[in-house]
Image (cartoon, rainbow, N blue to C red):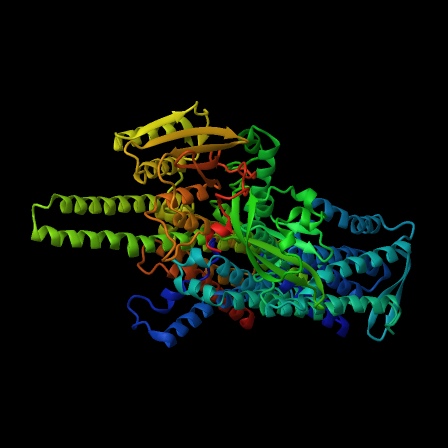
Amino acid sequence: MRSDGSVTEPSEQKSPPDASPTPTGTTGDGRRLLAAFAWGSPFTALVAAVEAFVATVLLGVPVTAAPAVVALVAFAVYSIDHVADADADAASTPDRALLARRYGDQLMVAATLAYGLAVAIAVTGGPRALALTLLPGAFWVVYASDWVPDLGRAIGTVLASATPDRRGLVGRAGATVTDGGRRSTLPRLKDVLVLNSAVVAAAWAIALTFLPIAFGGTAPGPVVAVVFAYFFLRSFVDAELPNVRDVDADAAVGVETLPVVLGVERTRHLLYGVDIVAAGTVAAAGAAGLLAWPLAGALGVGIVASVCVTALAGRIEDASVLGVAPDCSYILVGIAVAGVQLVG
Amino acid sequence: MIGLSPLSVALLAAVVTGTSGAILAWRERPEAGATWLALLLFGQVWWTTFLVFELEASTLAAKALWYDVQWLGVVIVPVGWLLFALEYTGRDRYVRPGVVAAACVAPAVTVLVVAMGDPTGLITADRRVADTAVGSFLRVDPGPWYYVIAGYTYLLGLIGSVPILRLVRDDARPFRGQSAALLVGTAVPWVSSLLHLTGAIPVPGLDPTPLAFAVSGVAYLLALSRFRLLTLTPAPRRRARQLVFEQLHDPVFVVGTEGHILDLNRCAADVFEVDRRSAIGEPADAVVPRYDALAGERGTVGPLSVVGRNGRRPYEVIVRGVTDDHGRSIGRVVVFHDIGEYLGQQQRLNVLNRVFRHDVRTETNLIHGYADQLRADPSDERALSVVKQSASRILDLSERTRTASELFDPVSEPDPPVPLGEVVAEAAADLREEYPHAEVTVDGDVPDVRVPATLRVVAANLCSNAVEHNDAASPSVWIEATIESGWVELSVADDGPGIDPAEYEALTHGVETPLEHGSGIGLWIVKWGIDQVGGRVSFAEREPRGTVVTVSVPVGDVPSGDSPPGDAEGSGTIASGDPASLGR
């Protein structure tokens, strides 16, 4: 998934430069917003459900309500994120930002009800399922909301008032910035290089790997580590790819991402490396007998798709592809895994 | 996955609405009450969630564990409700760390006892499983602390409900809707809890409170989404109304039905130099200026002349009755509105109207007549002289009008105080230069103090008037400055014919009529300038001939609350702010 919380590039997905003319007027506007909605959080929820299904199959646990819970949580978290960052997203994803601004209240109610429903379903899975369901929400609070900077600001204020040597004490407390307590000593994780993508990837990997286990009530063994590593590595790549798309906008506002710091080409090489590690993990699991080769092959489809998308980074005119293509690769994996299951 | 009883399914509905409401509330931080509402809803969800676990657990030990965990939610709910209600209704001054800590003492004790396993049976004396038609509950025999924390919960609920209840009758529809939803949201669980405690629930062991959270969750969601609970809060209203009262530039007093001061704003304390703390509870006639003129009055009274920090000023006093919700009188609000500026503007317009309508017209007619004479006889030197003198007078009038205009320019910054000696010396020097034939004498030593810069214009006009209207062959002018009780008295005496009674009458009454008006605007400039600094002007005859005009101004530029010496005593005094002198 993505470091900016986005899943798709709705406007450009719908109307690339060589597509038919964009509809105008109220109807056209409505269609654009509808498309933005469909390609936004609901699409993320669909992909999340597919991923949870893939994880269920890989782990060999019974099919449970886990995919539904993951889908609801994904819808909720990404909807809230889109509404919260509507202003910041106006440049990179204008239609989605417009939708979030215009229907912010309704989206928030829908998102929170979705999360409530996910929690309620998770309760039926027991305490561990409940805890795992709450985890993405907690991650989001740490990752994207202003709660952490607020906390940092409060700490800075306390430290500043406690000692005349403000800079020294705050520095010892591990602060990054301080100005008499007015500026936060702690940034949003969303704004921290690499850590932002790692947090998103970890949140996804934990939920996708452990929720099916919690709901299934079984202990699948070492394959858990393989599944976790696969989703973590894939999600890390997926989270960084949209940063290539947003490199100019991020650089303009001073946000440090891998493409901003390393450049697009070196980022591409780094992401190739991550995909290779993922491929190696899957191959090793196949060789060790933790994964059946057909399933390993199905995962390989996803990795190949990821490599192809990574190869496009910085080389295609319509950079919005980088927002949606990684997610589509999971649909491919889901179809492949379902095919393997059907064939037996 | 666990199999769910119908009761658990119903409880999960409360989890859905509660979680949704908690996230919505959390997101609205730092709006008033948002954090506490999120905490309240978190408590509800916590309680409900672990009740589901309790219901679905199969052993006594497991049920007991989940029952104990529920206590955290149980004790959070009332604290969250109380703090939310206080902050949401604008009583945030009570939501301080000390108050929050105090409110959390009993809940903390409860959680601590539970965490320690409740060895003495303070909260639950005995536990057993009760299988009923609707589920398998842990049935407990309450210990003494159970009733304490239950009573404490109801107490906080009641205290929190009081300010919310008051909003039900609010004029604003959104607040009525919000408060109604909140009351439903809190009343349903509380009633359910009471039914449980009184044994009115037929199912043994079933506490229906978490079930009622489904209703309260919907109510809170409705309040949050439809009535914009946290984005349209009444919290600022209370503070804003207080702020308006405090920051109003008009002095305001609140007087009780027994005639005692209940409150007064900062302006009242400043303008009338009243100590706010000691004034509360004092009889109104000892604190409110001219209260005798307001006794029993309603509506607008005045203008009344009142001496305050800004000297004597005319006030229009508005007296309004205060009634409670039942229409009973509970006091009066007395507002003093300084209308000096307004009346002054009216007066200036009046005078300027006369200047153009009478003075300029007279001079123009004169010029017109003598111009005809000059056409007939171009060598008529007298006619030429009259024309030139008339033109000079129009020019002088124009200059003085400009001076008056500058004196009251609302956008110009007032000049800083100037030394009195400088003012006197300047006035004498200008007079000697303009009228070389006049004899100008400065009597005595001039006190070494500073006076408002306006006195420069006033002194210049007084001196030029003393010579201009003097019919003596060699006019004499005496200038004297003394200081008394913080007030500077500047006297300008002349040996002229005295001030025309009509002019004096116009100045005294503050209004000119076609039959009773001054000539020029020199004396008016003196009066307006003195008004501006809260001083006074007095006129007296000089023996054997002439007039003495004395102006009193405060030392420096800040008028004191004291009246100028001799204020309002005897005739011939025109005090600043005296309504009689301002056309009323």
Q: Position of residue A287 (x, y in %)?
A: 54, 54
User: Does residue A324 appear anywhere in the picture?
Assistant: yes
Residue B75's place in the image compared with A27, above or below, is above
Q: Position of residue B292 (x, y in %)?
A: 65, 53
Residue farthest toward the front in the current orientation of the protein: B544
Quarter of image, res B218:
bottom right
Q: How many marks?
A: 0
Quarter of image, res B456:
top left
**Direction from residue B105 to residue A76 in the image, left or right:** left
Residue A337's place in the image compared with B491, above or below, is below
Residue B264's place in the image compared with A305, above or below, is above
Quarter of image, res B255:
bottom right
Pick the front one: B565 or B506: B506
Residue A53's place in the image compared with B477, above or below, is below
Q: Position of residue A53 (x, y in %)?
A: 57, 66
**Direction from residue B40 to residue B515 in the image, left or right:** left
User: Does residue A188 appear anywhere in the picture?
Assistant: no
Pick the front one: B423 or B57: B423
The N terminus of chain B, quarter of image: bottom right
Pick the front one: B467 or A325: B467
Q: Position of residue A239 (x, y in %)?
A: 47, 54
Pick the front one: B192 or B508: B508
